[in-house]
Image (spheres, grey):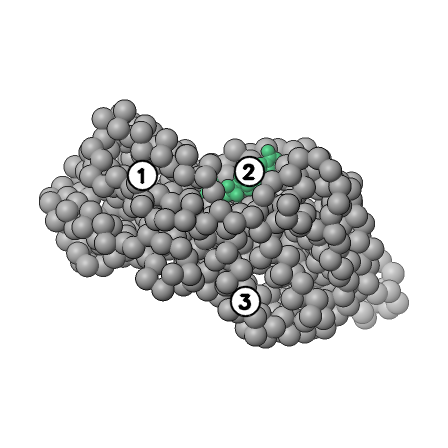
Protein backbone atom coordinates (compact mmCIF):
# COMPACT_ATOMS: atom_id res chain seq x y z
CA UNK A 1 0.00 0.00 0.00
CA UNK A 2 1.43 3.39 -0.92
CA UNK A 3 2.28 6.03 1.66
CA UNK A 4 0.01 8.69 3.08
CA UNK A 5 0.84 12.10 1.67
CA UNK A 6 1.85 14.42 4.51
CA UNK A 7 1.73 18.18 5.02
CA UNK A 8 4.21 21.05 4.93
CA UNK A 9 4.01 23.04 8.13
CA UNK A 10 6.49 25.59 9.52
CA UNK A 11 8.94 24.74 6.75
CA UNK A 12 8.96 21.00 7.48
CA UNK A 13 7.43 18.06 5.67
CA UNK A 14 5.13 16.50 8.28
CA UNK A 15 4.33 12.83 7.68
CA UNK A 16 0.72 11.72 8.10
CA UNK A 17 -0.06 8.56 10.00
CA UNK A 18 -3.58 9.08 11.35
CA UNK A 19 -6.50 6.92 10.38
CA UNK A 20 -9.91 7.67 8.91
CA UNK A 21 -11.12 8.04 5.33
CA UNK A 22 -8.43 8.17 2.66
CA UNK A 23 -8.42 8.82 -1.08
CA UNK A 24 -5.83 7.56 -3.59
CA UNK A 25 -3.84 10.08 -5.61
CA UNK A 26 -3.81 8.45 -9.04
CA UNK A 27 -1.98 8.89 -12.28
CA UNK A 28 -5.11 9.17 -14.45
CA UNK A 29 -3.24 8.00 -17.55
CA UNK A 30 -2.63 4.49 -16.18
CA UNK A 31 -4.24 4.19 -12.74
CA UNK A 32 -0.91 4.00 -10.84
CA UNK A 33 -1.38 5.00 -7.20
CA UNK A 34 1.05 7.85 -6.37
CA UNK A 35 0.04 8.28 -2.73
CA UNK A 36 -2.95 8.46 -0.40
CA UNK A 37 -4.52 11.47 1.30
CA UNK A 38 -6.20 11.32 4.71
CA UNK A 39 -9.37 13.30 4.21
CA UNK A 40 -10.09 14.37 7.79
CA UNK A 41 -6.67 15.60 8.91
CA UNK A 42 -8.19 18.39 11.03
CA UNK A 43 -5.37 18.07 13.59
CA UNK A 44 -2.91 19.03 10.83
CA UNK A 45 -5.16 21.96 9.88
CA UNK A 46 -4.93 23.27 13.46
CA UNK A 47 -1.15 22.83 13.42
CA UNK A 48 -0.83 24.69 10.14
CA UNK A 49 -2.93 27.62 11.39
CA UNK A 50 -0.86 27.71 14.59
CA UNK A 51 2.36 27.83 12.54
CA UNK A 52 0.98 30.61 10.33
CA UNK A 53 -0.20 32.57 13.41
CA UNK A 54 3.21 32.26 15.05
CA UNK A 55 5.00 33.46 11.90
CA UNK A 56 2.63 36.38 11.31
CA UNK A 57 3.92 39.16 13.62
CA UNK A 58 7.51 39.16 12.43
CA UNK A 59 6.56 38.56 8.76
CA UNK A 60 4.08 41.46 8.83
CA UNK A 61 6.84 43.62 10.39
CA UNK A 62 9.39 42.66 7.71
CA UNK A 63 9.68 45.57 5.23
CA UNK A 64 7.75 44.79 2.05
CA UNK A 65 10.91 45.35 0.00
CA UNK A 66 12.54 42.50 1.93
CA UNK A 67 9.49 40.26 1.70
CA UNK A 68 9.47 40.45 -2.08
CA UNK A 69 13.15 39.47 -2.23
CA UNK A 70 11.90 35.96 -1.34
CA UNK A 71 9.56 36.13 -4.36
CA UNK A 72 12.30 37.36 -6.70
CA UNK A 73 14.45 34.37 -5.63
CA UNK A 74 11.42 32.07 -5.84
CA UNK A 75 10.79 33.09 -9.45
CA UNK A 76 14.31 31.86 -10.32
CA UNK A 77 13.91 28.65 -8.29
CA UNK A 78 10.70 27.96 -10.23
CA UNK A 79 12.49 28.53 -13.56
CA UNK A 80 15.20 26.09 -12.42
CA UNK A 81 12.56 23.47 -11.53
CA UNK A 82 10.19 24.28 -14.39
CA UNK A 83 10.34 20.90 -16.15
CA UNK A 84 10.22 18.99 -12.86
CA UNK A 85 6.99 20.75 -11.83
CA UNK A 86 5.46 20.26 -15.28
CA UNK A 87 6.27 16.51 -15.18
CA UNK A 88 4.70 16.24 -11.73
CA UNK A 89 1.51 17.83 -13.08
CA UNK A 90 1.47 15.39 -16.01
CA UNK A 91 1.74 12.42 -13.65
CA UNK A 92 -0.86 13.36 -11.04
CA UNK A 93 -3.26 15.36 -13.23
CA UNK A 94 -2.85 13.85 -16.70
CA UNK A 95 -2.33 17.08 -18.66
CA UNK A 96 -0.24 17.03 -21.81
CA UNK A 97 3.31 18.25 -21.25
CA UNK A 98 2.47 21.48 -23.15
CA UNK A 99 -0.57 22.14 -20.95
CA UNK A 100 1.44 21.39 -17.81
CA UNK A 101 4.12 23.86 -18.86
CA UNK A 102 1.38 26.45 -19.37
CA UNK A 103 0.11 25.75 -15.84
CA UNK A 104 3.56 26.46 -14.37
CA UNK A 105 4.20 29.48 -16.60
CA UNK A 106 0.90 31.17 -15.66
CA UNK A 107 1.74 30.47 -12.01
CA UNK A 108 5.12 32.19 -12.39
CA UNK A 109 3.28 35.19 -13.90
CA UNK A 110 1.47 35.57 -10.55
CA UNK A 111 4.76 35.46 -8.64
CA UNK A 112 6.16 38.17 -10.91
CA UNK A 113 3.10 40.36 -10.34
CA UNK A 114 3.34 39.89 -6.56
CA UNK A 115 6.93 41.21 -6.75
CA UNK A 116 5.32 44.60 -7.42
CA UNK A 117 3.83 44.66 -3.90
CA UNK A 118 5.96 47.64 -2.74
CA UNK A 119 4.35 49.75 -5.45
CA UNK A 120 0.91 48.18 -5.22
CA UNK A 121 0.68 48.58 -1.43
CA UNK A 122 1.38 52.30 -1.43
CA UNK A 123 -1.34 54.33 0.20
CA UNK A 124 -2.76 57.81 -0.44
CA UNK A 125 -2.30 61.11 1.29
CA UNK A 126 -4.45 64.23 1.21
CA UNK A 127 -2.81 67.04 3.16
CA UNK A 128 -4.76 69.90 4.66
CA UNK A 129 -8.16 68.23 4.68
CA UNK A 130 -9.21 70.81 7.29
CA UNK A 131 -7.87 73.60 9.47
CA UNK A 132 -8.31 73.64 13.21
CA UNK A 133 -8.41 77.10 14.78
CA UNK A 134 -8.24 75.90 18.38
CA UNK A 135 -4.80 75.33 19.95
CA UNK A 136 -3.16 77.92 17.63
CA UNK A 137 -0.15 79.51 19.25
CA UNK A 138 -0.75 82.88 17.60
CA UNK A 139 -3.34 84.70 15.53
CA UNK A 140 -0.84 84.76 12.63
CA UNK A 141 -0.83 80.99 12.25
CA UNK A 142 -4.45 81.08 11.05
CA UNK A 143 -5.10 77.51 12.13
CA UNK A 144 -3.41 74.13 12.39
CA UNK A 145 -3.42 71.91 9.32
CA UNK A 146 -5.03 68.46 9.49
CA UNK A 147 -3.71 65.77 7.14
CA UNK A 148 -5.16 62.42 6.18
CA UNK A 149 -3.49 59.26 4.92
CA UNK A 150 -4.68 55.79 3.98
CA UNK A 151 -2.38 52.79 4.34
CA UNK A 152 -2.80 49.19 3.23
CA UNK A 153 -2.01 46.67 5.96
CA UNK A 154 -2.09 42.85 5.94
CA UNK A 155 -4.97 40.90 7.45
CA UNK A 156 -3.27 38.02 9.30
CA UNK A 157 -3.61 34.31 8.53
CA UNK A 158 -5.27 33.64 5.16
CA UNK A 159 -6.47 30.30 3.78
CA UNK A 160 -6.60 29.05 0.18
CA UNK A 161 -8.64 26.07 -1.03
CA UNK A 162 -7.95 24.98 -4.60
CA UNK A 163 -9.38 22.64 -7.29
CA UNK A 164 -7.66 19.85 -9.19
CA UNK A 165 -7.59 21.37 -12.67
CA UNK A 166 -4.60 23.75 -12.39
CA UNK A 167 -2.49 22.18 -9.64
CA UNK A 168 0.33 24.78 -9.69
CA UNK A 169 -1.27 27.94 -11.10
CA UNK A 170 -4.42 28.28 -9.00
CA UNK A 171 -2.57 28.12 -5.65
CA UNK A 172 -0.35 30.87 -7.07
CA UNK A 173 -3.40 33.06 -7.72
CA UNK A 174 -3.52 33.25 -3.94
CA UNK A 175 -0.51 32.78 -1.75
CA UNK A 176 2.28 34.81 -3.46
CA UNK A 177 0.23 38.03 -3.34
CA UNK A 178 -1.08 37.21 0.14
CA UNK A 179 2.40 36.77 1.62
CA UNK A 180 3.87 39.69 -0.36
CA UNK A 181 1.30 41.87 1.44
CA UNK A 182 2.54 40.58 4.82
CA UNK A 183 -0.05 37.87 5.54
CA UNK A 184 0.82 34.28 6.34
CA UNK A 185 -0.95 31.47 4.53
CA UNK A 186 -2.36 27.95 4.78
CA UNK A 187 -3.02 26.23 1.44
CA UNK A 188 -5.36 23.24 1.18
CA UNK A 189 -4.87 21.86 -2.35
CA UNK A 190 -7.24 19.43 -4.05
CA UNK A 191 -6.89 15.95 -2.58
CA UNK A 192 -6.64 14.71 -6.19
CA UNK A 193 -3.42 16.64 -6.93
CA UNK A 194 -1.63 17.44 -3.65
CA UNK A 195 1.89 16.54 -4.82
CA UNK A 196 2.40 19.52 -7.16
CA UNK A 197 1.25 21.99 -4.49
CA UNK A 198 3.52 20.44 -1.86
CA UNK A 199 6.48 20.70 -4.20
CA UNK A 200 5.54 24.25 -5.20
CA UNK A 201 5.63 25.32 -1.55
CA UNK A 202 8.71 23.24 -0.71
CA UNK A 203 10.53 25.20 -3.43
CA UNK A 204 9.39 28.44 -1.78
CA UNK A 205 11.44 27.44 1.26
CA UNK A 206 14.49 26.93 -0.95
CA UNK A 207 13.96 30.56 -1.98
CA UNK A 208 14.19 31.64 1.66
CA UNK A 209 10.63 32.10 2.92
CA UNK A 210 10.77 31.86 6.73
CA UNK A 211 9.09 28.82 8.33
CA UNK A 212 5.35 29.22 8.87
CA UNK A 213 4.79 31.97 6.29
CA UNK A 214 3.36 29.52 3.74
CA UNK A 215 2.04 26.11 4.85
CA UNK A 216 0.24 23.25 3.11
CA UNK A 217 -2.24 20.94 4.74
CA UNK A 218 -3.66 18.06 2.71
CA UNK A 219 -7.11 16.55 3.13
CA UNK A 220 -10.74 16.89 2.07
CA UNK A 221 -13.94 18.63 3.13
CA UNK A 222 -13.44 18.19 6.93
CA UNK A 223 -10.08 19.97 6.70
CA UNK A 224 -11.63 22.79 4.66
CA UNK A 225 -14.49 23.23 7.10
CA UNK A 226 -12.03 23.43 10.01
CA UNK A 227 -9.85 26.01 8.25
CA UNK A 228 -12.62 28.31 7.07
CA UNK A 229 -14.19 28.59 10.53
CA UNK A 230 -10.95 28.69 12.55
CA UNK A 231 -10.85 31.60 15.02
CA UNK A 232 -7.34 32.61 13.92
CA UNK A 233 -8.11 32.80 10.18
CA UNK A 234 -9.03 36.19 8.67
CA UNK A 235 -9.68 35.47 4.98
CA UNK A 236 -10.58 32.59 2.69
CA UNK A 237 -9.89 32.35 -1.02
CA UNK A 238 -11.60 29.44 -2.81
CA UNK A 239 -11.60 28.10 -6.37
CA UNK A 240 -13.72 25.08 -7.34
CA UNK A 241 -17.26 24.04 -8.24
CA UNK A 242 -20.27 26.31 -7.70
CA UNK A 243 -21.84 23.89 -5.21
CA UNK A 244 -18.79 24.03 -2.94
CA UNK A 245 -18.13 27.75 -3.62
CA UNK A 246 -21.59 28.57 -2.31
CA UNK A 247 -21.00 26.47 0.84
CA UNK A 248 -17.57 27.98 1.50
CA UNK A 249 -18.80 31.54 0.93
CA UNK A 250 -21.75 31.27 3.30
CA UNK A 251 -19.82 29.32 5.96
CA UNK A 252 -16.72 31.54 5.89
CA UNK A 253 -18.75 34.78 5.84
CA UNK A 254 -20.98 33.41 8.60
CA UNK A 255 -17.85 32.85 10.67
CA UNK A 256 -16.82 36.47 10.08
CA UNK A 257 -14.14 35.86 7.45
CA UNK A 258 -13.49 37.86 4.31
CA UNK A 259 -14.17 35.48 1.40
CA UNK A 260 -13.79 35.29 -2.38
CA UNK A 261 -15.13 32.11 -4.03
CA UNK A 262 -14.64 31.34 -7.72
CA UNK A 263 -17.11 28.70 -8.97
CA UNK A 264 -18.03 26.69 -12.06
CA UNK A 265 -18.94 27.76 -15.58
CA UNK A 266 -20.89 27.12 -18.76
CA UNK A 267 -19.17 29.04 -21.52
CA UNK A 268 -20.49 29.84 -25.00
CA UNK A 269 -18.58 30.64 -28.16
CA UNK A 270 -20.54 32.51 -30.87
CA UNK A 271 -19.43 32.09 -34.47
CA UNK A 272 -20.74 34.75 -36.85
CA UNK A 273 -21.05 34.08 -40.59
CA UNK A 274 -18.35 36.73 -41.24
CA UNK A 275 -15.80 35.11 -38.87
CA UNK A 276 -12.33 34.17 -40.03
CA UNK A 277 -13.02 30.46 -40.47
CA UNK A 278 -9.57 29.12 -39.54
CA UNK A 279 -9.37 31.26 -36.42
CA UNK A 280 -12.85 30.19 -35.33
CA UNK A 281 -12.20 26.47 -35.80
CA UNK A 282 -8.80 26.63 -34.09
CA UNK A 283 -10.17 28.78 -31.24
CA UNK A 284 -13.21 26.59 -30.58
CA UNK A 285 -11.16 23.38 -30.80
CA UNK A 286 -8.57 24.57 -28.26
CA UNK A 287 -11.22 25.97 -25.95
CA UNK A 288 -13.49 22.89 -25.97
CA UNK A 289 -10.86 20.13 -25.83
CA UNK A 290 -7.75 21.78 -24.32
CA UNK A 291 -7.01 20.40 -20.84
CA UNK A 292 -9.59 17.71 -21.80
CA UNK A 293 -12.36 20.25 -21.29
CA UNK A 294 -11.43 20.59 -17.60
CA UNK A 295 -11.09 24.37 -17.52
CA UNK A 296 -13.39 26.96 -16.02
CA UNK A 297 -12.71 28.85 -19.26
CA UNK A 298 -13.55 25.83 -21.45
CA UNK A 299 -15.80 26.71 -24.38
CA UNK A 300 -18.55 24.17 -23.91
CA UNK A 301 -21.24 25.40 -26.32
CA UNK A 302 -20.51 26.60 -29.86
CA UNK A 303 -23.26 28.81 -31.27
CA UNK A 304 -22.82 29.30 -35.01
CA UNK A 305 -25.21 32.05 -36.11
CA UNK A 306 -27.31 31.62 -39.28
CA UNK A 307 -25.38 30.29 -42.25
CA UNK A 308 -22.12 29.98 -40.22
CA UNK A 309 -23.34 26.50 -39.23
CA UNK A 310 -22.92 25.31 -42.83
CA UNK A 311 -19.13 25.58 -42.75
CA UNK A 312 -18.55 25.48 -39.02
CA UNK A 313 -20.25 22.18 -38.09
CA UNK A 314 -18.52 19.81 -40.57
CA UNK A 315 -15.16 21.54 -40.04
CA UNK A 316 -15.22 21.32 -36.23
CA UNK A 317 -16.20 17.64 -36.32
CA UNK A 318 -13.35 16.85 -38.73
CA UNK A 319 -10.86 18.78 -36.59
CA UNK A 320 -12.04 17.10 -33.36
CA UNK A 321 -11.72 13.64 -34.96
CA UNK A 322 -8.05 14.34 -35.66
CA UNK A 323 -7.12 14.98 -32.00
CA UNK A 324 -4.85 12.19 -30.77
CA UNK A 325 -5.99 10.98 -27.38
CA UNK A 326 -3.07 9.58 -25.37
CA UNK A 327 -1.07 9.80 -22.16
CA UNK A 328 0.13 13.31 -21.38
CA UNK A 329 3.80 12.36 -21.79
CA UNK A 330 3.26 10.73 -25.21
CA UNK A 331 4.96 13.01 -27.78
CA UNK A 332 2.02 12.48 -30.17
CA UNK A 333 -0.64 13.50 -27.63
CA UNK A 334 -3.29 16.07 -28.51
CA UNK A 335 -5.57 15.44 -25.53
CA UNK A 336 -4.89 13.58 -22.28
CA UNK A 337 -7.14 11.73 -19.81
CA UNK A 338 -9.79 13.05 -17.44
CA UNK A 339 -8.78 13.38 -13.80
CA UNK A 340 -10.37 10.13 -12.58
CA UNK A 341 -12.95 7.46 -13.31
CA UNK A 342 -15.64 9.60 -11.63
CA UNK A 343 -14.83 12.25 -14.23
CA UNK A 344 -15.29 9.68 -17.03
CA UNK A 345 -18.60 8.54 -15.51
CA UNK A 346 -19.85 12.14 -15.34
CA UNK A 347 -18.91 12.87 -18.96
CA UNK A 348 -20.40 9.59 -20.22
CA UNK A 349 -23.55 10.37 -18.22
CA UNK A 350 -23.87 13.74 -19.99
CA UNK A 351 -23.42 12.08 -23.38
CA UNK A 352 -26.33 9.80 -22.52
CA UNK A 353 -28.37 12.79 -21.25
CA UNK A 354 -27.75 14.55 -24.58
CA UNK A 355 -28.98 11.50 -26.50
CA UNK A 356 -32.03 11.18 -24.25
CA UNK A 357 -32.86 14.87 -24.76
CA UNK A 358 -32.80 14.42 -28.53
CA UNK A 359 -29.50 16.10 -29.47
CA UNK A 360 -27.61 14.57 -32.41
CA UNK A 361 -24.28 12.95 -31.47
CA UNK A 362 -21.95 13.65 -34.40
CA UNK A 363 -18.81 12.39 -32.66
CA UNK A 364 -18.98 9.82 -29.87
CA UNK A 365 -15.89 9.68 -27.63
CA UNK A 366 -17.12 7.06 -25.19
CA UNK A 367 -14.80 4.39 -26.58
CA UNK A 368 -11.49 6.25 -26.57
CA UNK A 369 -9.48 3.11 -27.28
CA UNK A 370 -6.40 4.11 -25.30
CA UNK A 371 -4.74 1.01 -23.82
CA UNK A 372 -3.41 0.87 -20.25
CA UNK A 373 -6.32 1.42 -17.86
CA UNK A 374 -6.43 5.23 -17.91
CA UNK A 375 -9.43 7.57 -17.56
CA UNK A 376 -10.00 8.45 -21.20
CA UNK A 377 -12.98 9.87 -23.08
CA UNK A 378 -12.27 11.12 -26.61
CA UNK A 379 -13.65 14.40 -28.06
CA UNK A 380 -17.42 14.29 -28.47
CA UNK A 381 -19.61 16.68 -30.47
CA UNK A 382 -23.38 17.14 -30.27
CA UNK A 383 -25.39 19.04 -32.87
CA UNK A 384 -28.97 20.39 -32.66
CA UNK A 385 -28.64 21.29 -28.99
CA UNK A 386 -31.21 23.80 -27.74
CA UNK A 387 -30.82 26.31 -24.88
CA UNK A 388 -33.39 24.38 -22.84
CA UNK A 389 -31.32 21.16 -22.85
CA UNK A 390 -29.07 20.28 -19.92
CA UNK A 391 -26.14 20.11 -22.36
CA UNK A 392 -26.56 23.86 -22.81
CA UNK A 393 -27.07 24.74 -19.15
CA UNK A 394 -24.92 22.49 -16.94
CA UNK A 395 -21.16 22.31 -16.51
CA UNK A 396 -19.89 19.00 -17.96
CA UNK A 397 -16.16 19.61 -17.31
CA UNK A 398 -15.00 17.24 -20.01
CA UNK A 399 -14.37 17.03 -23.77
CA UNK A 400 -17.97 17.44 -24.97
CA UNK A 401 -18.80 20.26 -27.38
CA UNK A 402 -22.47 21.09 -27.83
CA UNK A 403 -23.55 22.99 -30.94
CA UNK A 404 -26.53 25.31 -30.67
CA UNK A 405 -27.48 26.65 -34.11
CA UNK A 406 -28.58 30.20 -33.26
CA UNK A 407 -30.82 32.13 -35.64
CA UNK A 408 -29.39 35.53 -34.75
CA UNK A 409 -26.72 37.07 -32.54
CA UNK A 410 -29.53 38.16 -30.21
CA UNK A 411 -30.65 34.52 -29.85
CA UNK A 412 -27.09 33.48 -28.98
CA UNK A 413 -26.72 36.25 -26.41
CA UNK A 414 -30.11 35.36 -24.89
CA UNK A 415 -28.98 31.72 -24.50
CA UNK A 416 -25.77 32.84 -22.76
CA UNK A 417 -27.65 35.15 -20.42
CA UNK A 418 -30.16 32.43 -19.55
CA UNK A 419 -27.54 30.20 -17.90
CA UNK A 420 -26.84 30.46 -14.18
CA UNK A 421 -23.12 30.98 -14.89
CA UNK A 422 -21.17 33.97 -16.21
CA UNK A 423 -17.50 33.13 -16.41
CA UNK A 424 -16.68 33.87 -20.05
CA UNK A 425 -18.19 34.36 -23.48
CA UNK A 426 -16.46 34.41 -26.85
CA UNK A 427 -17.39 35.78 -30.27
CA UNK A 428 -15.67 35.12 -33.60
CA UNK A 429 -16.51 37.87 -36.10
CA UNK A 430 -14.94 40.43 -38.41
CA UNK A 431 -17.57 43.02 -37.48
CA UNK A 432 -16.56 45.55 -34.84
CA UNK A 433 -20.21 46.43 -34.44
CA UNK A 434 -21.24 42.86 -33.56
CA UNK A 435 -18.17 42.37 -31.35
CA UNK A 436 -19.02 45.46 -29.38
CA UNK A 437 -22.69 44.51 -29.08
CA UNK A 438 -21.60 41.12 -27.75
CA UNK A 439 -19.19 42.68 -25.26
CA UNK A 440 -21.89 45.00 -23.93
CA UNK A 441 -24.78 42.52 -23.79
CA UNK A 442 -23.25 39.15 -22.82
CA UNK A 443 -23.46 38.71 -19.05
CA UNK A 444 -20.02 37.24 -18.40
CA UNK A 445 -16.96 38.54 -16.59
CA UNK A 446 -14.43 37.62 -19.27
CA UNK A 447 -15.07 38.24 -22.98
CA UNK A 448 -13.04 36.91 -25.90
CA UNK A 449 -13.15 38.54 -29.31
CA UNK A 450 -11.63 36.17 -31.87
CA UNK A 451 -9.88 34.45 -28.93
CA UNK A 452 -11.01 30.99 -27.75
CA UNK A 453 -9.77 31.17 -24.16
CA UNK A 454 -9.85 34.77 -22.88
CA UNK A 455 -7.64 34.02 -19.85
CA UNK A 456 -6.55 37.31 -18.30
CA UNK A 457 -2.91 37.94 -17.48
CA UNK A 458 -2.08 38.02 -13.78
CA UNK A 459 -2.18 41.84 -13.79
CA UNK A 460 -5.95 41.74 -14.46
CA UNK A 461 -8.61 40.35 -12.13
CA UNK A 462 -10.01 36.92 -13.01
CA UNK A 463 -13.62 37.97 -13.12
CA UNK A 464 -16.51 35.50 -13.15
CA UNK A 465 -20.11 36.75 -12.77
CA UNK A 466 -23.41 35.28 -11.56
CA UNK A 467 -22.99 31.79 -10.04
CA UNK A 468 -19.40 31.62 -11.28
CA UNK A 469 -18.34 33.90 -8.43
CA UNK A 470 -19.34 34.70 -4.86
CA UNK A 471 -17.80 37.76 -3.22
CA UNK A 472 -16.68 41.25 -4.17
CA UNK A 473 -12.99 41.15 -5.05
CA UNK A 474 -11.84 38.67 -7.69
CA UNK A 475 -8.58 36.72 -7.90
CA UNK A 476 -5.43 38.35 -9.33
CA UNK A 477 -4.70 41.89 -10.42
CA UNK A 478 -5.50 44.82 -8.20
CA UNK A 479 -8.42 42.89 -6.71
CA UNK A 480 -5.99 40.38 -5.14
CA UNK A 481 -4.00 43.17 -3.53
CA UNK A 482 -7.21 44.65 -2.13
CA UNK A 483 -8.50 41.26 -0.99
CA UNK A 484 -5.36 40.48 0.98
CA UNK A 485 -5.06 43.91 2.68
CA UNK A 486 -7.26 46.30 4.55
CA UNK A 487 -7.18 50.06 4.89
CA UNK A 488 -5.99 51.95 7.89
CA UNK A 489 -6.93 55.64 7.73
CA UNK A 490 -4.96 58.23 9.64
CA UNK A 491 -6.25 61.74 10.42
CA UNK A 492 -3.61 63.85 12.18
CA UNK A 493 -2.85 67.31 13.45
CA UNK A 494 0.33 68.41 15.21
CA UNK A 495 -0.12 70.97 17.92
P1 LIG B 1 -14.45 20.91 -6.08
O1 LIG B 1 -15.40 21.99 -5.76
O2 LIG B 1 -14.93 19.51 -6.04
O3 LIG B 1 -13.18 20.95 -5.08
C1 LIG B 1 -12.46 22.14 -4.86
C2 LIG B 1 -11.88 22.14 -3.46
O4 LIG B 1 -12.96 22.12 -2.52
C3 LIG B 1 -11.00 20.94 -3.15
O5 LIG B 1 -9.86 21.38 -2.46
C4 LIG B 1 -11.89 20.06 -2.27
O6 LIG B 1 -11.15 19.33 -1.30
C5 LIG B 1 -12.79 21.05 -1.58
N1 LIG B 1 -14.13 20.52 -1.29
C6 LIG B 1 -14.83 19.65 -2.06
N2 LIG B 1 -16.04 19.39 -1.49
C7 LIG B 1 -16.08 20.13 -0.35
C8 LIG B 1 -17.06 20.30 0.67
N3 LIG B 1 -18.24 19.67 0.63
N4 LIG B 1 -16.77 21.11 1.70
C9 LIG B 1 -15.60 21.77 1.76
N5 LIG B 1 -14.64 21.64 0.82
C10 LIG B 1 -14.86 20.84 -0.23
O7 LIG B 1 -13.84 21.28 -7.52
P2 LIG B 1 -12.87 20.41 -8.46
O8 LIG B 1 -13.63 19.27 -9.01
O9 LIG B 1 -11.59 20.14 -7.76
O10 LIG B 1 -12.56 21.49 -9.61
C11 LIG B 1 -13.39 21.69 -10.72
C12 LIG B 1 -14.30 22.88 -10.54
O11 LIG B 1 -13.55 24.06 -10.28
C13 LIG B 1 -15.11 23.18 -11.80
O12 LIG B 1 -16.44 23.48 -11.44
C14 LIG B 1 -14.42 24.41 -12.38
O13 LIG B 1 -15.24 25.22 -13.20
C15 LIG B 1 -14.01 25.11 -11.13
N6 LIG B 1 -12.94 26.08 -11.36
C16 LIG B 1 -13.28 27.41 -11.34
C17 LIG B 1 -12.32 28.37 -11.60
C18 LIG B 1 -12.70 29.83 -11.59
O14 LIG B 1 -11.81 30.67 -11.59
N7 LIG B 1 -13.97 30.19 -11.60
C19 LIG B 1 -11.00 27.98 -11.86
C20 LIG B 1 -10.69 26.62 -11.86
C21 LIG B 1 -11.68 25.68 -11.61
Comparing marks 1 and 2, which lies closer to the viewer?
1
Q: Residue furthest top?
A: 356
59 or 81, nearer to the observer = 81
Query: Is label 1 in contact with label 2 (beta carbons under 8 Å)?
Result: no
User: Does residue 386 appear left or right of residue 156 in this picture?
Assistant: left
Q: Quadrant of the C terminus?
A: bottom right
How far apart marks 1 and 3 lie (CA) works out to 32 Å
Residue 32 seen anywhere in this rendered image of the structure: yes
The mark tally for this picture is 3
Q: On the image, numbered disc 2 is attached to which residue? A: 245
Instruction: Give percent across and percent down for residue 177.
Output: 62, 60
User: Does residue 176 appear left or right of residue 283 in this picture?
Assistant: right
Query: Which circle's residue, 3 or 2, is located before the other in the chain?
Result: 3
Query: Which circle's residue, 1 or 2, is located before the other in the chain?
Result: 2
Q: Quadrant of the N terminus?
A: top right
383 or 424, nearer to the observer = 383
Q: On the image, numbered disc 3 is attached to which residue? A: 84
Residue visible at 23% across and 59% down in the picture: 279
Q: Label for residue 366?
A: 1
Amino acid sequence: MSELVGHLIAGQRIPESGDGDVIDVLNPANGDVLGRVRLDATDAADRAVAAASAAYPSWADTPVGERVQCLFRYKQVLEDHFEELASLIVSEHGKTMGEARGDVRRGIDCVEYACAAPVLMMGNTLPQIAVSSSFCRSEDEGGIGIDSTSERVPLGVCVGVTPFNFPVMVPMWMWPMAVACGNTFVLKPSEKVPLSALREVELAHEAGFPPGVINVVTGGAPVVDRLITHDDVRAVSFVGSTRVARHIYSTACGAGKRAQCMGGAKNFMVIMPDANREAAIEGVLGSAFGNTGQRCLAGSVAAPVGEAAEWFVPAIVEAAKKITVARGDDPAVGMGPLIDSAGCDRVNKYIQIGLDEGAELLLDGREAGVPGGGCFVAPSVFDKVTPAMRLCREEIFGPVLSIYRAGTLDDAIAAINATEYGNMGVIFTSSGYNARRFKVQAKAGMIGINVGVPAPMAVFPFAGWKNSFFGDLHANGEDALRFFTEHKILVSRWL
